[in-house]
Amino acid sequence: MTFVDTGAWAGLFVPADPVHNAARDWLQTNRDRLVTSDYVVDEVITLLKTRCSTQAAIAAGQSLLGERLATFIYLLPDDIQRAWKIFRAHTDKGWSFTDCTSFALMQRLQISTAFAFDNHFSQMRGIRREPG
């Protein structure tokens, strides 16, 4: 399985995004099952609405919530608590709380690969960021 982060989704859904081609190309060659979280989907939809349009946000939301591209996973209360511990333990990093929820979910699901353009995923021990 590969976890998909906000920046990868945004790159995929926004043709003008600087990473669009890299995101599209990586996705076309990927053979792993993709998973994403409710927190990431929230970020993607909000980002697209504010930076692009409501229609772009709705189109992405329909694709993600309809699980056309990835399995959609809700964070559990234990994931939130684990994320909070990660957030507090790594104050030297620029990680958002959503990053930490992604790390916690990846730990629970034993996922070691992230489709992400966010270098924060390279900073967390045990995670390989794709595309490399």
Image (cartoon, grey):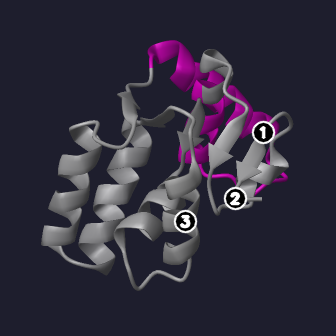
Residue depth check, mark 1 versus mark 3: number of the one nearer the observer: 3
Where does the image place residue 61, in percent across and percent down from the top left? Answer: 22, 51
Local SS, label 3 = helix
Q: Nearer the viewer, residue 4 or 123?
A: 4
Where does the image place residue 98, in percent across and percent down from the top left? Answer: 53, 45
Pointer 2: residues within 10 angstroms few (<14), some, or many (20+)? some
Q: Which mark is residue 131?
A: 2
Q: Which mark is residue 127?
A: 1
Question: Which residue is drawn at the image coordinates 70% and 27% (left, top)?
Answer: 85
- Name the image quarter holding residue 132: bottom right
Where does the image place residue 93, in percent across and percent down from the top left? Answer: 79, 54
- Name the image quarter holding residue 59: bottom left
Question: Which residue is drawn at the image coordinates 18% and 49% (left, top)?
Answer: 62
Mark 1 and mark 3: Cα distance apart in space: 21 Å
Q: Is residue 113 left or right of residue 34?
A: right
- Name the image quarter holding residue 131: bottom right
Question: Which residue is drawn at the image coordinates 37% and 36% (left, top)?
Answer: 38
Q: Main secondary structure of the magenta part?
A: helix
Q: Nearer the viewer, residue 58 or 94?
A: 58
Pointer 3: residues within 10 angstroms few (<14), some, or many (20+)? few
From which residue to which does the magenta span run? Answer: 76-105
Q: Which residue is mark 3?
A: 25
Amino acid type assigned to the residue bearing label 3 in the image: Asp
Local SS, label 1 = loop
Q: Is residue 62 above or below residue 77?
A: below
CB atoms at circles 2 and 3 under 8 Å apart? yes
Q: Nearer the viewer, residue 73 or 26?
A: 26
Amino acid type assigned to the residue bearing label 1 in the image: Ile
Question: Which residue is drawn at the image coordinates 79% and 47% (left, top)?
Answer: 91
